[in-house]
Amino acid sequence: MIINRYIIAYFLFSVLGWVWESIYCTAKEKKWQNRGFLYGPLCPIYGAGGIIATLVFNVMFKNNDAKIWQIFIICMLGSAVLEYVTSYVLEKLFHAMWW
């Protein structure tokens, strides 16, 4: 039943990411900003990023011997790759630039 944990984590990361980004952009623009392209409070890139990070860190750092610079580099490269691939796929599917 470990898949249930990942499904719940995916939706939790997606909703929390949407909330965080919507609050930040609303405060910045001083008017309501609905972030994301789906209906409802869900931003899948945050869910995918959270699940990928969880899987990567579970495999790479089983003995809790991670150094802070290793975590930083992995997160930096992983998020850059995730953002680029997501942007490319969305541009090809919807013929629009999302960011």
Image (cartoon, rainbow, N blue to C red):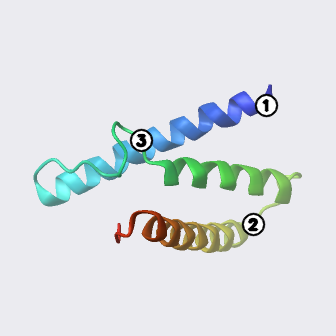
Image disc number at residue 67:
2
Image: 24 above or below 38:
below
Residue picked out by circle 1: 2
Q: Amino acid at mark 2?
A: Lys
Look at 38% across and 69% down and name the residue there. Answer: 95
Crowd rating for badge 2 (residues with CA inside 10 Å; few <14, some 14–19, many 20+): few
* Left or right side of 83 for 34: left
Look at 25% across and 48% down and name the residue there. Answer: 34
Image: 10 above or below 65:
above
Residue picked out by circle 3: 42
In this view, which residue lies farthest toward the top? Answer: 1
Q: Amino acid at mark 3?
A: Leu
Image: 53 above or below 68:
above
Q: What whole-number distance in Å separates the C-alpha atoms at marks 3 and 1?
A: 22 Å
Foreground residue, 91 or 41? 91
* Left or right side of 5 for 97: left
Q: Position of residue 83 (x, y in %)?
A: 51, 68
Total marks shown come to 3
